[in-house]
Structure formats: structure tokens, C-alpha cells
Image: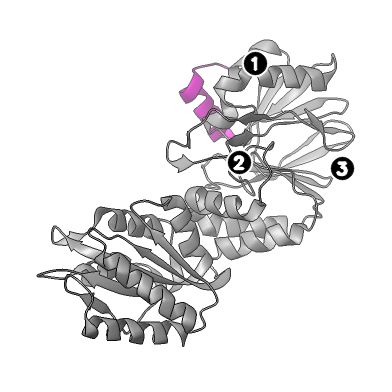
């Protein structure tokens, strides 16, 4: 429990038990499931927590209430890491009303099979709720990143309760930079829905915001322009940093050697930043994050079963399903008898918008030789030009 303002109290929990967030993302520093209480003539609670932490969350809530009863539970997002304690709340506080939109209540029935007739406050986009000093405006944000999502603006505190927007991986009792894990979180989870995030940012730009209270990660209250600018870049698929990402797979090490040689050439050629990632061994979500962060991408892989190596196909599919665009892409292919990887990779990327493909394609037949090394040199010159 932590006091954010005289009226807003944080009652979330830290999860260091979790191994994979959403059963796919590595979270070495755990996760935070955030929840907030706003004290007023009527008390509003914003979202609940994951089922494993229901008892801890209810204890935090009780301490924040100080013997009072909540008037409302506002359910901004129905993903189970935020909604799994709704039934426990409803049972503990039978007089409290539950606030959500029509999709919210449909999902409550689907997930938990509970009936909230007579206790449901069904809101529409732009509706308000006054609890005394505080007036809350509900702003729908569909597909950021589920269809029922809405955010809430508190005009009294000038606070935006932002649901999953502006969230990050990592529990709150660990010390780490916001941007790295927020970027990995954004592109892993929200990245497909850039247009919807842009729409939300447009609505938020009209509001005087002092702090952002997300459902994951710290409360943001200083230099909000920094966070808003990053979200604008990410959701518009802009280039955040100058640099080259080389993502590769290598079966027997020859493609890796070519990648290492190219990385050295790029660094000598003056490329500001070169990031090399082994798609079979490194964190795939971090590779996706880097591909969206930097403006140039080199894909290097082997021809495999007349296709491409599986980790490379997965990586490209993760990029395309998230709307990868506005980048320069180059190819290195390896094949001992029928190298076709570059053609396959380009075909997978053809649906991406505003992609510039490098003129120089490097073909390796088994291992580097003088001809393929010269091709690497030309590619490095093109990328650094």
C-alpha cells in the first residue's frame, strides 16, 4: 500500500512467482498488478488483481479503506491478471457497484459466471461519474489491447488511470529503467494496435495530465512528455534510435561467422549502433523490440526444408503481425545446394508497408569465400551510406 496523493492510494501487488507473462514473455524481475483506491465521499476502486494474490490485495484494500466501504469498483480491463478478484470483491463488499461497459459485463459472465444484476453501472464512451470532489470521465480505448478496455480521467487530481497503456514488465520492488521493459512490453503485447493507441493519444492530448497510473509498472508523474513521445513513436511505427539490428539463425556456425563479419564492417563504417541477436538462443521478444526500435534490419538465415529456419520464420511472423513498417531490410542467405532463403523472407515481408529492401543480397554457399565476403562489404557500405 502506498499513498500517491492525499486521495489516491496504491494497493497493487508484486508477483515474483511468475515464470512467463501471458505464457510467453520472460519476466526476470516479475510483474506488478496495479490497483488503486480513490478516497472521496464515495470511494472508487480501480481494477483488482491476479487470482493468486486475491487475499493480499483484499488486505491492502481493507487497510486503504480504513474501516469505510467502497462505493464502486471500476473494471477498466478484463484480462485475468486484473480481473480475477472481481468475484471476491463483490462478495466482500455486497453494496458496492461495479462499473464497466457492455463488453466488460459480457466477459465477467464468461470468465466467472457471476451475476451482477442490480449492481452493474454500464457506461458509454465519455460518461462521467462523480464521487464528491472527484469527477471521473471514462474514455473508451478498444484494442489497447482488448476490445472492452477504457481509461479513466480524474479531473480533480488530473490523473489518467490508463489501463495497460504505459505499462511495463517488472515488479515495483525492483530497480530498472522504464523504457527498455516498457518497449518490450508494448511491442510484445500492444504493438499490433498502433492506430488504436494513436487514437487514445489524440484524446489524451486534450487533457491536462499530471500523472499516469497504469495497471503495470510505476506511477508516472515527472517529465510526462518523455513517455508520451515514446508512445507516439512506437504507435506510429517511427524509428526511435539510429542503428542496425542483425537477427540471425545459424546451424553449424557459418552464417553466424558472416553476421559477425558484417557487424564489424558496420561498426568500422560508422554505424552508430549495431545489435546482433541469435534468434534460436536469445529472447525473441527482445529481438522484436529491437527490430521496432532501430531503422535498419538485417535478416540472416539458412535455407531449411526448402523454406527458412523455423526461428527466423517465427521472428518475421511476429514482426508482420505487429504491423512492421517504415524500415530498411537486408538479407543474408545460406544454402549448400539451393539457397532460396532471401526469396522466402522477402515474400513474408511483402505485405509490410513502406519497406525499403537493400539492393545488395548476400548469398553464401555453405561457408564464406572471397565472393560472399565482397558482397558483405557492399552490403555494409549500403547500410552505412
Percent position of residue 257, x then y: 31, 69
Cβ atoms at labels 1 and 3 below 8 Å apart: no
> What residue would you read off at disc 1?
55
Percent position of residue 296, x then y: 45, 73
Q: Which of the 4 quarters of the picture holds residue 179? A: bottom right
Helix, strand or loop status at disc 2: loop
The span shown in magenta is: 101-115
Cβ atoms at labels 3 and 2 below 8 Å apart: no
Q: Residues within 10 Å of mark 3 (few under 14, many from 20)?
A: few
Helix, strand or loop status at disc 1: helix
- Is residue 106 in the magenta section? yes
> What residue would you read off at disc 2?
170
Percent position of residue 150, x then y: 63, 42
Give how far apart the Cα atoms at labels 1 and 3 are.
31 Å
Q: Quadrant of the N terminus?
A: top right
Of 107 and 321, nearer the camera is 321
Q: Residue at x 59, y 17 (%)?
A: 87
Q: Residues within 10 Å of mark 1 (few under 14, many from 20)?
A: few
> What residue would you read off at disc 3?
156
> Of discs 1 and 3, which sits in the foreground?
1
Q: Earlier in the sequence, mark 2 or mark 1?
A: 1
Q: Earlier in the sequence, mark 3 or mark 2?
A: 3
Amino acid at each position: 500500500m502506498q499513498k500517491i496523493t492525499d486521495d489516491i492510494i496504491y494497493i497493487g501487488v508484486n508477483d515474483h512467482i511468475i515464470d512467463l507473462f501471458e505464457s510467453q514473455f520472460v519476466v526476470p524481475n516479475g510483474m506488478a498488478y496495479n490497483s488503486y483506491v480513490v478516497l472521496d465521499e464515495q470511494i472508487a476502486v480501480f481494477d483488482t488483481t491476479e487470482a493468486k494474490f486475491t487475499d493480499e490485495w483484499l488486505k491492502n484494500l481493507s487497510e486503504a479503506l480504513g474501516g469505510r466501504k467502497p462505493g464502486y469498483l471500476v473494471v477498466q480491463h478484463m484480462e485475468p491478471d486484473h480481473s480475477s478478484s472481481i468475484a471476491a470483491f463483490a462478495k466482500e463488499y455486497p453494496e458496492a457497484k461495479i462499473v464497466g461497459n457492455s463488453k466488460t459485463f459480457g466477459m465477467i459472465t464468461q470468465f466467472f459466471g457471476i451475476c451482477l444484476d442490480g449492481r452493474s453501472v454500464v457506461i458509454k464512451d465519455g460518461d462521467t461519474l462523480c464521487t464528491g470532489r472527484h469527477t471521473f470521465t471514462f474514455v473508451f480505448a478498444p484494442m489497447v489491447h482488448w476490445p472492452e478496455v477504457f481509461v479513466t480521467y480524474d479531473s480533480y487530481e488530473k490523473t489518467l488511470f490508463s489501463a495497460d497503456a504505459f505499462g511495463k514488465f517488472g515488479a515495483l520492488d525492483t530497480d530498472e529503467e522504464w523504457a527498455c521493459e516498457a518497449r518490450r512490453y508494448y511491442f510484445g503485447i500492444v504493438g499490433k494496435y498502433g492506430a488504436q493507441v494513436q487514437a487514445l493519444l489524440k484524446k489524451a492530448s486534450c487533457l491536462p495530465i499530471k500523472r499516469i497510473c497504469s495497471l503495470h509498472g510505476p506511477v508516472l508523474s515527472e517529465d510526462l512528455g518523455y513517455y508520451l513521445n515514446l508512445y507516439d513513436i512506437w504507435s506510429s511505427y517511427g524509428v526511435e534510435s539510429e542503428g542496425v539490428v542483425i537477427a540471425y539463425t545459424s546451424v553449424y556456425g557459418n552464417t553466424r561467422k558472416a553476421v559477425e563479419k558484417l557487424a564489424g564492417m558496420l561498426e568500422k563504417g560508422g554505424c552508430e549502433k549495431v545489435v546482433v541477436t541469435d534468434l534460436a538462443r536469445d529472447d525473441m521478444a527482445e529481438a522484436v523490440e529491437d527490430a521496432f526500435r532501430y531503422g535498419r534490419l538485417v535478416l540472416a538465415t539458412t535455407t531449411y526444408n526448402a523454406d527458412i529456419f523455423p526461428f527466423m520464420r517465427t521472428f518475421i511472423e511476429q514482426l508482420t503481425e505487429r504491423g512492421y513498417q517504415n524500415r530498411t531490410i537486408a538479407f543474408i542467405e545460406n544454402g549448400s545446394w539451393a539457397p532460396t532463403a532471401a526469396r522466402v523472407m522477402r515474400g513474408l515481408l511483402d505485405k509490410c508497408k513502406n519497406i525499403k529492401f537493400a539492393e545488395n543480397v548476400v548469398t553464401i554457399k555453405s561457408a564464406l569465400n572471397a565472393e560472399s565476403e565482397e558482397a558483405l562489404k557492399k552490403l555494409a557500405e549500403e547500410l552505412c551510406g
